[in-house]
Amino acid sequence: MATSGTATFESSFYIDDIITEAYERIGMFDYSGNNIKTARRSLNIMFQEWANRGLHYWEVRNNSITLVDGQSEYTMFRSTADGTSDATAVYGVDDILEMSYRNSSSVDFPLTKINRSEYQALSNKTNNGTPTQYFVQRFIDKVTVTLYLTPGSTEAGNTINYYYVKRIEDAGAYSNNADVPYRFVPCMVSGLSYYLSQKFAPQRTQEMKLLYEDELQRALQEDGSSSSSYISPKVYYPSV
């Protein structure tokens, strides 16, 4: 039996193909001009909505920042380069997952992520030393990380190694590929069909929504890397 010998469909499935498939699913076969533009806009809106659907493992990246003597706050940007003069800036960051302090011998020491209240409760935020904790703030245009303790001259030049969630890239040109893995191609098309049905086929919106949510749920369940988990009860012995 002859087969294609390839498994690269998503690499030749461009933005205009996604739009065509989505329109066909709601029964529209004659579209052009603004209909193409509005479909791309809906696709970008859907990608942003996916950020509210939990962690997307294909968008997890690793990076390092070099510590500066006396500097506790470091900035990453949500959007692409926009004229900032910070040559060391990292772009497309949506959230920080975990961090480690890496010394000059390339030995890592995990940092503990704390919330705003815990950071606010620290009595002296300017104390110098090896960082042990970090506080993340997510703004409209940037993400900042504040370290505690503040790196001193001993820590300057060493690095913080971290994993972060990158934003899904915009659709861009119609000849682009979507910034999603092959597992998410079915739900991406179903999702765009759902969004377009709200504009052009409202009588089918509920149907398209059910198909979209079903396919998206399966893709989210498959995403990531499986590993073993162990749960042990904590035993307390009350004093007599």
Image: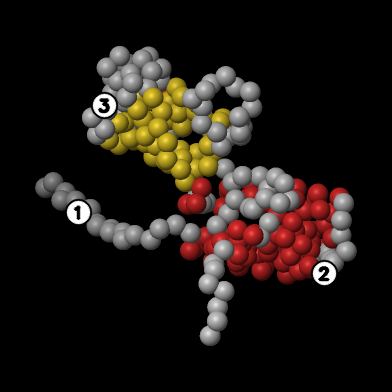
| Residue at the disc numbered 2 | 27
Q: How far from the left and from the top, in percent, is residue 173?
A: 72, 46
* Three-letter amino acid code of the residue under disc 1: Val
Please indicate, yes or no, whether residue 116 appears anywhere in the rendered image.
no
Mark 1 or mark 2, which is nearer the start of the sequence? 2
Q: Find the distance from the CA under tag 1 to the CA under tag 3.
A: 40 Å
Which circle marks residue 200 in the picture? none
Q: Residue at x 53, y 37 (%)?
A: 93
Q: Position of residue 111 (x, y in %)?
A: 32, 34
Q: Is residue 139 left or right of residue 73?
A: right
- Of the two numbered discs 1 and 3 on the same chain, state the one appearing first in sequence: 3
> What residue sits 38% from the left and 18% below the top?
68
Vertical order, 57 against 155 (above or below): below
Circle 1 residues within 10 Å: few <14, some 14–19, many ≥20: few
Comparing 130 with 16, the one in front is: 16
**Above or below: residue 227 compared with residue 62:** below
Residue 235 image label: 1
